[in-house]
Image (tube, helix red, strand yellow):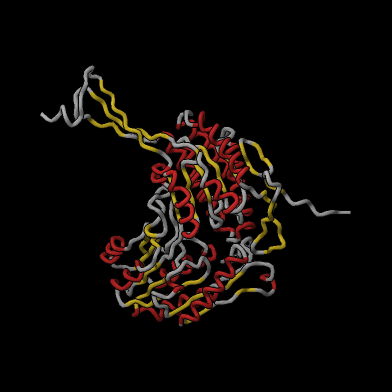
Amino acid sequence: MATAASPRVFKNFINGEWVESRSGKAYENRNPANTDELVGIFVASGSEDVNAAVDAATEAYKSWRLVPAPKRAEILYRAAELLLQHKEEFSSDMTREMGKVLAETRGDVQEAIDMTYYMAGEGRRLFGQTTPSELPNKFAMSARQSIGVCGMITPWNFPMAIPSWKMMPALVSGNTVVLKPAEDTPLSSYHLVQILMEAGLPNGVVNLVSGDGPNAGAPLAGHKDVPVVSFTGSTAVGRIIAEMCAPDFKHCSLEMGGKNIIIVMDDANLELAVDGAIWGGFGTTGQRCTAASRVAVHKSVYGEFVSRFVARAKKLRVGDGLDATIDMGPCINEQQLKTVMSYVEIGKAEGAKLLTGGNRLTSGAYAKGWFHEPTVFGDVAANMRIAQEEIFGPVVSVIPVDNFEHAIEVANGVPYGLSASIYTRNVNLAFAAMRDLYTGIVYVNAPTIGAETHLPFGGTKQTGNGHREAAIAAIDFFTEWKTMYIDYSDKLQRAQIDNAE
């Protein structure tokens, strides 16, 4: 008699071993497109597990920091090669646990590959400076130094790309890591950690504890032996983490919310702008911090743009992301779906015009998933809640604007400042927008999503606390500068005093 296979149980990874949580508790990870499908069972960690992981990382740091950076980088290079080999397998698993369509999960894994290759290259480029001294027979230089154990708390929407943004620069810089992935999407982080170990990373250099924010994330952020905390998630949680880090003056990087905008000017290529608004608004089911949840359209082309945009949104095919014909997957979980539905009701109550969508999808193939229609509101006022607050779902607000100046005012008039875009054929307006949009990222004739790994990623205002991820900016966060003066004059020389004559 055939029996169903037992679900796979995933343990914590501490000091090179897969271990149970101290509590013995575990939780289920289910496919948001079909909750009947159990992706796996993951242990639920608490402060004891975090303590064990931090202890392992602290001990490993003693030797890892002394490994020459080019040798650390060689391990990352091997990891990138292995990720490339497993790309299709990891992409499929990510769609099963996160829901976004397979083309997007392939992009997510590719971003991890790109970041790992990039940071492997930095192993021979952790440059400092040399500079002339103001005194004779004296040499001056600076160098980067590692910091210690880095606590990393990552979100569910990019479950392999974002952990790689944090882990790879930290590792090549000589730090050790304790990773707490989002409880909705831990499998992708498990794959990433497994690959690093296969590539030859020493035991204890990377550790993983699964679980929720209050029980696993908070003890990690507040741990006395974790001098560096990197968090990506909501602004509300980011504020709590900042407060936890402040008493010990920890390095704290916060990458949080966004309320991003696409500006469509009267001279724009409208079909291109519609393409960008569809991809920016409904890619990843709108569950990106860079999602284009607002579109500000010049009044002279507003009607035509809206007509084309709504027609395209209605044609989007919603369903299981493993189906190659599907354009948009489910929301990540029931709570996120309820949030989206509540904002649809808020938009209606505020007087915005519901142009398409607005409903949960429940019949047939949708019955066992967290699906919502692509939704467009028109005639939205810039001060409405749906145009001010991050929804993190497939809801786009279209706002009519009078001119370029009005568009910039609308764009900057939100609490966030992550990404913005303008569609125009006027080079003067394009450069003025790049100057005047107060965001960390600006696109011209492209949507608000599509960041590349070799440029800084992050935002202004309540989007973050001034740090940036990716590129050299990430190395800046995960290292400290050390300045060194070597005096070979064989006498006392006093800077700013003895050179005054």
Q: Residue at x 64, y 64 (%)?
A: 320
Q: Which of 478 and 67 is in front in this view?
A: 478
Q: In which quarter of the image is the N terminus?
A: bottom right
Residue 110 can be seen, yes or no: no
Left or right for 97, reference 432 = right
Q: In this view, does 347 lie above or below 465?
A: below
When asked about the image quadrant of residue 480, the answer is top left
Residue 122: image quadrant is top left
| Residue beneath the point at 57% across and 32% down | 202
Residue at 57 percent across and 44 percent down: it is: 83
Q: Position of residue 32 (x, y in %)?
A: 64, 62
Location of the C terminus (image quadrant): top left
The count of marks equals 0
Residue lying farthest to the right in this orientation: 1
Residue 28 image position (x, y, % from top left): 69, 55
Residue 223 in view: yes
Check the image and name the residue furthest to the top: 490
Question: Where is residue 291 shown, x and y percent of the image?
Answer: 47, 64
- Point out the residue furthest to the left here: 501
Residue 457 locus on image (x, y percent): 41, 52
